[in-house]
């Protein structure tokens, strides 16, 4: 028997452990063309909250009483597929199951020797790719500009800031504790940090940290911090809308300041994206990120929680800011 996790209820507001259920079933056996995968590491990410709603989006919603899925690192335990051998490591969008069958499609082989396996869920996975492509395709960051990053101590934000420094920019990060501010300045090389939880006036704090204004704002949170950032943007500034964790659990659509006048007067670009918009670029981006990692121009941090049954709680902890960098569950 093995365990798997399904979505039991569609959350109203903030999710709870009651919205998940752990079930058991018999371990499957691979048929012709199939492989049996054993989950090793499971990625939990804020965007999964959106898939718990029954609404149309860029990716289908989860179905009730069926397994949730996210990026997983797994090992091939048995193979009836000529493209995979026993012992291979793979990454892909897989179910929250201890064991599962796959036909091998949409799986990527990963090498344990290149980097720790978990790096392929983070800095060498969709996390790092998202940071790179958001800056490249929308931010169009240029040397000497000022980059502001929210969620700066998180998995994506910490990579965004480091790429900004590689490109010769001033980088200011926004995070939710003094410990996280120390981390982004000391470990990730940000020039300055703002603790939004101890700041009464975000607009003024951003102005102090960015006296020459903000050229690119990489937004991972949305809400009031986005409002404050836009008031500090320079003319022709670019806002990269990557995430909006401040709004994911809202039961009603919040009303904020109207930003149209800022967009017009400053000729601002504000664009949302999902990393899959640029799937054709993934391979080249991973090559560049890998090179920077080897050259010690990039580093990363992970919060690793142990135990398959802890996956739901690890996901919930994201909304409490209990992660440093990428949140991963070791099965």
Image (tube, rainbow, N blue to C red):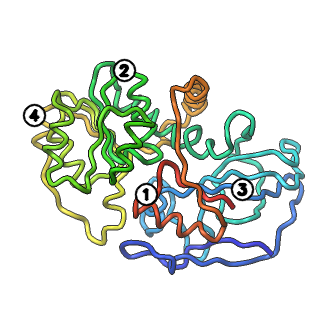
Which residue does the numbered mark 3 point to in the structure image? 40
Instruction: Tell me residue 246's x, y (percent).
Output: 32, 59
Name the residue rendered at 16%, 37% in the picture.
208
Q: Decide if residue 140 is on the left or right side of residue 112.
A: left
Mark 3 element type: strand
Mark 1 element type: loop
Q: How many other residues sit within 10 Å of disc 4, few (<14), some (14-19) or many (≥20)?
A: few
Mark 4 element type: helix
Discs 3/4, front: 3
Which residue does the numbered mark 1 point to in the structure image? 57
Residue 168, relative to residue 84: is it above or below? Answer: above
Q: CA distance from mark 3 to mark 1?
A: 29 Å
Q: Decide if residue 172 is on the left or right side of residue 121.
A: left
Discs 3/1, front: 3
> Mark number for residue 168?
2
Q: CA distance from mark 2 to mark 4?
A: 28 Å
Question: Closest to the observer: 69 or 294?
Answer: 294
Which of the two discs, 2 and 1, labels the residue nearer the N terminus?
A: 1
Question: Closest to the observer: 39 or 283?
Answer: 39
Which residue does the numbered mark 4 point to in the structure image? 265
Q: CA distance from mark 2 to mark 1?
A: 36 Å
Residue 56, relative to residue 25: is it above or below? Answer: above
């Amino acid at each position: 028997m093995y365990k798997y996790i399904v979505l039991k209820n569609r959350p109203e507001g903030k999710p709870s452990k009651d919205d998940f259920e752990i079930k058991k079933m018999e371990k499957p056996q691979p048929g012709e063309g199939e492989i049996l995968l054993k989950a090793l590491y499971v990625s939990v990410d804020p965007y999964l909250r959106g898939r718990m709603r029954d609404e149309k989006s860029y990716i289908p919603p989860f179905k009730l009483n069926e397994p949730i899925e996210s990026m997983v690192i797994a090992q091939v335990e048995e193979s009836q597929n000529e493209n995979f051998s026993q012992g291979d490591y793979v990454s892909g969008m897989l179910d929250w199951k201890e064991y599962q069958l796959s036909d091998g499609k949409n799986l990527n082989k990963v090498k344990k020797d290149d980097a720790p396996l978990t790096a392929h869920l983070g800095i060498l996975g969709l996390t790092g790719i998202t940071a790179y492509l958001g800056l490249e395709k929308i931010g169009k960051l240029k040397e000497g500009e000022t980059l502001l990053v929210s969620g700066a101590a998180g998995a994506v934000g910490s990579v965004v800031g480091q790429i900004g420094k590689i490109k010769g920019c001033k980088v200011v990060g926004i995070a939710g504790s003094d410990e996280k501010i120390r981390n982004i300045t000391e470990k990730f090389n940000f020039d300055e940090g703002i603790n939004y939880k101890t700041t009464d006036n975000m607009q003024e704090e951003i102005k102090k940290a960015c006296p020459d204004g903000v050229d690119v704002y990489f937004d991972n949170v949305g809400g009031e911090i986005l409002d404050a950032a836009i008031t500090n943007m320079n003319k022709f500034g670019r806002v990269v809308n990557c995430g909006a964790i401040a709004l994911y659990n809202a039961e009603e659509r919040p009303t904020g300041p109207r930003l149209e006048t800022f967009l017009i007067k400053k000729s601002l670009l504000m664009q949302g994206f999902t990393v899959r918009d640029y799937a054709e670029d993934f391979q080249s981006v991973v090559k560049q990120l890998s090179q920077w990692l080897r050259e010690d121009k990039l580093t990363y941090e992970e919060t690793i929680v142990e135990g398959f049954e802890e996956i739901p709680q690890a996901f919930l902890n994201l909304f409490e800011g209990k992660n440093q960098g990428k949140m991963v569950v070791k099965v």
